Amino acid sequence: MENLANQRKNYKPTLPNTLKDLQSITLEKGEHPSHVDSNVAELIPNTKSQPFMHITEKKSDVSNALKIGVVLSGGQAAGGHNVITGIYDAIKKINPNSELIGFLNGPSGIINSEYKELTSDFIDLYRNQGGFDMIGAGRTKIETLEQFENSAKTVTKLNLDGIVIIGGDDSNTNAALLAEYFEKENIKTKVVGVPKTIDGDLKNEHIEVSFGFDTATKTYSDIIGNIARDALSAGKYYFFIKMMGRSASHVTLECALQTHPNYTIIAEEVAANKKTLQSIADEMCDMIIKRAEKGKNHGVILIPEGTIEFIPEFKALISELNDLLSTSKHAEKIANTENREERINLVTQQLSKESAQCYQTLPYEIKLQMIMDRDPHGNVQVSKIETERLFIELVKSQLKEKSSKYKGKFSAQPLFCGYEGRSCLPSNFDSQYCYSLGHVAALLINSGVTGYMASVQNLTLPVKDWTVAGIPISAMMTMEKRKGKLKPVIEKALVDLNGKPFQKFVESRESWKFNDEYIYPGPIQFFGPESITDLTSITLDCEKSHSVSKC
């Protein structure tokens, strides 16, 4: 049966002009990064001094056949399959005898030597398709000596020229450490990373955006626009919508710019202004009361899933709970207390005065979530806390206290925009961006370098004018304390409160509060004028514009 997904298999992504004749180009070394963290350099002495790589003409149009492995690491993001098809098409253009090996179910496929050869007939089924089901994904980290040794055995057995790791900040940190290990052991396999995460927090001056962000935010904005229209039509519901993005609010900010909700929390602003749960709920209540005075008992509120971790009082509470539930002498006693009320009381007694006060203000169900759901290390599973329901209960409680001022009727609906944005059909932007990233990754390996991330830049220009580069991962890394130990990481990019996207939001949000200036973007458009089908995100457009007024 013919459907849109089948139609998309025939879509031909456009390549930048610089990538159209791979047999006549290569990547050559350019300038060195201005700074590499000295502690990071000590950990990766063989790959610490990597220069940037830029396109140049090749002296010979003859290239040896390549044998490359590819792995999907971490959570799904629309466009991952196009990175793989981009790698495949690129290595076949470089030499028709080249081979592509897919490691199954994430990095564990490298460790356990589980893989399959990716052939043309098989790959063609996944062109421009969502998800990571071509070879599966996983979150295993290659970090122990045994894992590194097993990975080395796998790539040596397969005689791989390179591995492409498609993943986020942790996965690309892993790529850098794997590249270092292979260099130290004189293994020929080169390691290259590709920037992936719908959260949008893997970006810097060299990586303009991670793939998947564009598709996810367009998908969520369609949903939010539909909800806003329903709120306006029914006139009697407040929708509290939790958004993907635990560590940063890029998704929430982009969706706010696309849809103009009545109230939006930006977690980075919460942290900067040291806002409390109470003060945020107060702001929501004040808006709801004023809207009721205008006869409006409906609205849309966006909440990043990581909001509570940016609230100072809550951050301290989570830290204390983590200690209490994982390493404390009280942990076993708490776990063996079956009565829920007793368990809550027992936990409260062990907290500091300030954290106990914060904990006591929470709705009963949230209190339970914070002590019942724990990760394998015993830590609070913050991502499972229903932040949208937390704020609904806080607002309900405060509106009762302000009943003399509030004459409206408050009816709230909780929603979560989450997994539906990770595996959908990629937008034209992500389809083309990922296809180009795959070509750059292949070029980096063909150029004989390791420890790099593929980069495509000038993304607000027409695709033909995009530029490409190889960025040394070492230049993006820093040291961060995790579980009490300093570890190398690629630092997550938070929303810049001085940046143009946030300033554009600030200019308009007061008007959005009361005037119902909702925008209804509609579903992702794949066919029609390029001005609609190839739109980039507002965030990216803003960041590349010269002023806030022009973005």
Image: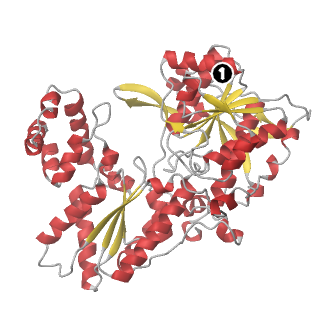
Q: Looking at the picture, does residue 222 appear above or below residue 460?
A: below
Q: Residue furthest front?
A: 1
**Where in the figure is residue 496, as x and y percent of width and height?**
47, 53
When the figure is inspected, residue 244 is found, relative to residue 132, above or below; the finding is below
Q: Would you say 128 lies left or right of 58 here?
A: left
Residue 397 position in % (x across, y down): 15, 65
Q: Quadrant of the N terminus?
A: bottom right
Residue 86 against residue 445 in the figure, above or below: below
Residue 257 visible in the displayed image: no
Furthest residue toward top:
185
Taking the spot 17% from the left edge, 78% from the top edge, the residue there is 406
Q: Residue placed at 72% from the left, 20% from the top?
A: 159
* Residue located at (36% from left, 50% from top): 306
Amino acid type of the residue tagged 1 in the rendering:
Val
> Which quadrant of the structure image shows residue 58?
top right
Q: Nearer the viewer, residue 207 or 436?
A: 436
- The reply, left or right, for residue 518 in relation to residue 173 is left
Q: Residue furthest bottom?
A: 295
Quickly name the residue at label 1.
Answer: 155
Dot 1 falls on a residue whose secondary structure is helix
For the residue pair 465 and 376, the one nearer the viewer reads as 376
Quadrant placement of the C terminus: bottom right
The answer to whether residue 172 of the structure is visible from this angle is: yes
Left or right: 522, with 46 as reference point: left
Q: Residue at x 57, y 61 (%)?
A: 537
Q: Please tell me in which quadrant of the rendered image residue 318 appears.
A: top left
Give the class, few, some or many, for how many residues have Cα within 10 Å of label 1's Cα (few <14, many ≥20).
many
Q: Position of residue 439 (x, y in %)?
A: 74, 42
Residue 328 screen position, x and y as percent:
18, 27
